[in-house]
Amino acid sequence: MGAGHDHSHHHHDHSVKLDHLNKAFIWGIVLNLTFVVVEAAAGLYSGSLALLTDAGHNLSDVASLALALLAYKLTKVTSNKIYTYGYKRSTILVSFFNAVILFAAIGVIVYEAVERLTQPQAVPGDTIIWVALTGIAINGFTAWLFMKDKEKDLNVKGAYLHMAVDAMVSLGVVISGVVIAYTGWFWLDSVVSIIIAAVILLGTWGLFKDSLRLEMDGVPKDMDIAAIKAELLKADGVLDVHHMHVWALSTTENALTAHLVITPEAVDRFDKIKHDLRHRLEHLEITHSTFEPEFSEKKCDDPVCC
């Protein structure tokens, strides 16, 4: 069996299919968007900053679910003369702007919470409890939709973690509602808002760093350049590797270019070498690769190689 055939067969067997998750994403988006409207309305009616804060958090998760679905949809869009890679990179742009918007929202939330700490306002604890309990049910159900496939795709895992964390945040809101109902400690509403903002900040900081790294064509997270080079050197006929670049085409696809130093005798089987390397790179989550051959007795003239 030829190396080229092995590569295409391997790619077919190991590519992640999200077709069956379309309904899960749609259900998650619809349910959580409905809950955002209900929670925001309840927060405005009751004057609860904790509910408004949590509604903002859930709205960011609706955006995250939509982004994960968009990432899948954009893989189906064909390239054109202007966008030769298609529109896959838009997933990185959306992630970055989503993080920036969330940072601004966190600033507003903390400012309002600190203002209310100096002048606590009465809020109905029972309203907070019932709305937050609804949030636990919706977030828990949405997390369950993604549980089975959370280890198969990064976007699915992100959606699962967002929903699981939301369920825990809603639990915190329930606890504050119970305490307020029995003690009248209305200042607790602001404290819970600040805690929720901190939880959002932790998740947003990771999203911001990862999206900025990809936007700047940095090596994707968890990818080891040394390990990738070592894998390339395992191919028969490859003596050295340099001028190697690894970057993300989208939030789910990565690319590589490299100069391969080979012996003059290996030039006739360079196609087989490329197929072997692409097969190896599939295991390292690199789906697009381009190789330039160089003969061992010649030195690369590119300044980057020096």
Image (spheres, helix red, strand yellow):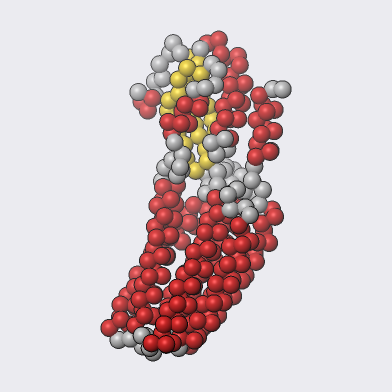
User: Which is more toward the observer, 269 or 227?
Assistant: 227
Judged from this view, the residue extending furthest toward the left is 118
Q: Return the x and y of residue 3 as percentages of the image width and height.
A: 66, 24
Q: Quadrant where the C terminus lies? A: top left
Judged from this view, the residue extending furthest toward the front is 182
At 48% across and 56% down in the image, what residue appears?
95
User: Which is more toward the observer, 264 or 227?
Assistant: 227
Judged from this view, the residue extending furthest toward the right is 1
Examine the rendering and report whether any part of residue 248 can be seen: yes
Total labels: the figure holds 0
User: Which is more toward the observer, 269 or 48?
Assistant: 48
Q: Return the x and y of residue 195 as percentages of the image width and height.
A: 38, 70
Q: Return the x and y of residue 61 as percentages of the image width and height.
A: 52, 65
Q: Return the x and y of residue 23 as percentages of the image width and height.
A: 68, 61
At 72% across and 22% down in the image, what residue appears?
1
Examine the rendering and report whether any part of residue 33 can be seen: no
Q: Quadrant of residue 10?
A: top right
Q: Quadrant of residue 183?
A: bottom left
Q: Is residue 282 left or right of residue 170?
A: right
- In the image, residue 294 above or below residue 153: above
Q: Is residue 238 left or right of residue 189?
A: right
At 63% across and 54% down in the image, what residue appears?
148
Q: Quadrant of residue 200?
A: bottom left
At 55% across and 32% down in the image, what residue appears?
281
